[in-house]
Amino acid sequence: MSFLNLSLLGGALLVAVPIALHLIMRQRPQLVQFPALQFVLARSEANRRQLRLRHWVLLVLRCAAIGLLALALARPSWTAGANSDRRDAPLAAAFVFDSSPRMAYMQENLTRLQKAQQEALWLLRRAPEDSKLAVVDSGASRMAFAVDAGAVSKQVERLQITPRARLLDEALADAISLVAGEDDHRQEVYVFTDLAQQSWNSAALARLQSILQAQKNVQLHIVDISAEEQQNTAIQEMSLNQNVLPLGGTLVLDATLYHQGPPREAVVELLMQDSETEQSRGRRRVTWEQSGEQQIQFRVDGLGEGTHQGRLQLNADDPLDIDNVWHFTVEVRSPPTILIAAEDEEHAIYLREALAPSDWVQQNRARFQVETVGFPQLSGVAFANYAAIALLDPPILETKTWASLTTYVTEGGELAIYLGREADRDSFNQPAPQTLLPGPLLQRAQGELYFSIDNYSHPSLAAFAPYADQVPWPALPVFKYWQLEQLDDGVQQVIRLSDGQPAMLEQVLGKGRVVTVTTPVSDAPNAIGREAWNLLPVGLDVPWPFVLWSRELFGYLAGQDEDQVNYLPGETVSLQLTPAEQLEVFRKKGYVVRGPDGEATRHAATAGQEWLTIATTDLLGNYQVVAGGTTGLLKRGFSTHLPPKSTDMRAIDTAVIAEELGEDRVHFAKSREQIERQVGIARHGTEFFSWLVGIVAVVLAAEHVAANRFYKS
Amino acid sequence: MPTVEQYLKPEVIRQISRLDLRAQFIVKGFMQGMHASPFHGFSVEFSEHRKYTPGDDPKDLDWLVYAKTDKYYVKKFEAETNITGYLAMDLSESMGYTYRQELTKFEYAICLAAALCYLMIHQNDPVGLVTFEEKIRTSLPPKSKRQQIGAVLSILANLQPQGKTDLQNSLSQLAAMLRHRSLVMLFTDLLVDQEASIAGLRRLRHGGHDVILFHILDEAEVEFPFDGLVELEEPESGQKLEVDANAFRADYREQVTAFRDRFRSECFQSGIDYVPLDTSMPFDRALTEYLVTRKNRA
């Protein structure tokens, strides 16, 4: 409790006056002659007691009136928490704006950001002249107080919606830290937000709670600038089955559409750029009876080799149209060539068919091109021509072969070694093979084992993650495997067997990687005299786990899908050039990046530059990276799209925010009147003046009535 | 033209300073009102003539006698029966009280007594006067001559209420004084010991006399119109008491009603006519009561 005019509280001492008057100067009643007194005497005692009570009541009322009036004039207020002792201090305030795409929602001809700007400018005009003010928006990280109020106003007016907005809680945390540095100021942060759950999720609240607990003097004012009865239909997210498709592959686009509002119908169209024009590659009509999500899928075949760009367009007229389109890029390339070294074709059949099924090869749909070679011919192979090499149950190899393989890997090649019955411990424990192997071989172990995987984060296993509990690894038993002694430093165990021993290991070697599997995938199940070490390729009628594992493993090794072509705004794009593209860029002395707005910027390049790095990716849409014009060899591209679900406007209950951050630290307002009132409460606390004056009026009226009734005038 | 009501209102009567005129005023008003009263038709037979003297009402002239004698004679009326009346006036100090009315209880009683005297004399009823407080102070023997009005009014006009009352003793004295059956009209506020008062009244009645008890209270003594804190002082004893009048009013009125009801009941049982009056009430009530009694004796 604090008082605005503490000295006036001394007026409460005037309560002594009615007490003194009561004791010293009792009002004399009027003397009246009355012969019939005998009738009064009979009930006089009871009347006397009543008289005495009324005297006391009147005294209490008069004392209460004086005391309450003195208290009211002292202007008491309750200021719980921050700024209670800084009533007269100058103001340090930060205005935080959410400039994410959601703020483009239009209502009454104003976007939410424009609405926020209006309210902020109104609030700025009311800030005291000696205030220190800063503007912090989620689109940029300005962290300084402006020179004066005029500069702040200009900053507010220049705010724009940006797709690359950072998280609102990050901006808020910066703002809180900024004002908290002003020790001798009242510290206030105003955030203009639509209270969407994704901005005020549990992680954001936890972060803000932590920072507010550390900065106890900061008051947070949340100004709700959300629209009334929001409606929106959006492409919430979209994914491609692959960013880099093999030639002949099918592009599959899965999209999640979300609608908030009354029932409606909309049309979704897939458009892809074909030379100079856009071609429709599919349409869907989607109907919502109520708010909710719907899934749609488009499949596109027959894409030629090269970079393809397009967009998914939602034809739905609503107040927020930034989320009605989703741009994408996909590259179609010839499938990488995998070299399988095996005893013979028969031993390579499982892996070969898993990577390049014969049917698909004939249809040019295979994800990989596979070549096989026998081990005796291995030393004559030019390893550099292959994206990855698989050694299926290698026998003793020449040292120079191991050395060649080591060179291949260290210069960027990818090698997979499947150890089996042909491995010789003494030979494989020699330095040359040990360079590639993850550790010395110990012994052949056996048992009724299977792959036991509890972490599907490795790229070769990520595809299993949605079905983690359903993969029937026990139906693909492992009977024998190679146990290793201690593992080398830097070796990662990717898959274990059910006895805890490693089944698949990975290590980085130079620019490349080596994956070692301790059990082979080349045993025929019914080979006479050669008991199979496992049934990985044949344990099920449809050995889909083995096929999927093999494809994902070699897709990972071959670098498929490592090339990212779809980004979020603001991310730095990296494009790896092929040798031919590198030469083209060098010849043209650079390359051109054309943005979604049609603006083109030229960038220089150096000889042998393998990677292009592009940082100016703020706009949403399709970008083209070219060199040499329409006939040039460099015709690449990438796309930027909104973060998934970034325009979900479902709002959080303010009670949740208040509970997490503390009701005495956060204040909510939607209208200007509420802003003024909340700011007043935060700065001056809850004043009781009006209540006390009301009570004084009631007490005075009661005293007047009682006195009039009691004393004859 | 004054109305009947104006004749009978105490505040109007107050404006007449001469008691004889007051009495006439009251009686005239009362008599005029008789036309609509249940006593209409009350008549008094004239028993003899007397010579006309200036001042007599020409309406009373007996024109038949004039026709026969060429002389002016007025009819001399007399009631169907003669009753001897005594006006008994309480002179206690409490009778001199008024709060906000025009007349004190005593003045009200005097006006009433004078009017009754006037009425009775004109009906040839002898009227006497007795005044008392602790004992009988003044006693005027009853006479029916016209001069008796003057004598009664003269005494009444000079009376001043003072001292305390001993109603029982006074009434006992009066009862001993009366030789013949009489009509005693008692004017008092009865603010004395109730048991003693009742005993006195019974004593009077036991003597065979008709009694009309005019119980006169001040309007304030009936209504208790005070507000807020007041200090009440009893004028006879000087006793004072501070009360919250607003809180007390209901109880007080209850007390007074019970007080009156008791005397009403006792009087009824004793065959005494009880007339509760307060100084705000017109006089016709009292006068009507006299006539009722007069008629019942007929």
Image: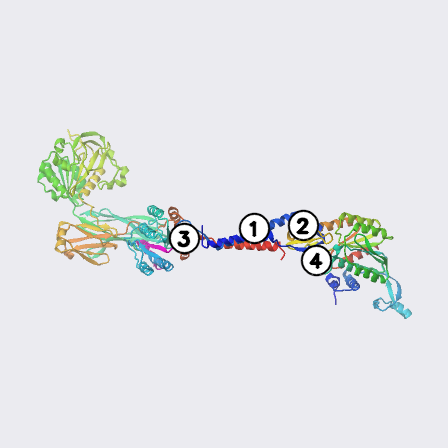
A62 or A588, which is in the foreground?
A62
User: Do callouts 4 and 2 point to residues on the same chain?
Assistant: yes
Q: Quadrant of the N terminus of chain B?
A: bottom right
Residue A454 horizontal side relative to residue A398, left or right: right
- Residue on which the image places disc 4: B99
- Residue on which the image places disc 2: B251
B132 falls in the magenta region: no
Q: What SS does tag 3 mark?
A: helix
User: Do callouts 3 and 2 point to residues on the same chain?
Assistant: no
A105 falls in the magenta region: yes
Q: Amino acid at mark 3?
A: Ala
User: Which residues, given as a range, are shown in magenta?
Assistant: A87-112
In the picture, residue B65 is in which quadrant? Answer: bottom right
Q: Amino acid at mark 4?
A: Tyr
Q: Amino acid at mark 2?
A: Asp
Comparing labels 4 and 1, the label whose residue is closer to the camera: 1
Comparing labels 1 and 3, the label whose residue is closer to the camera: 1
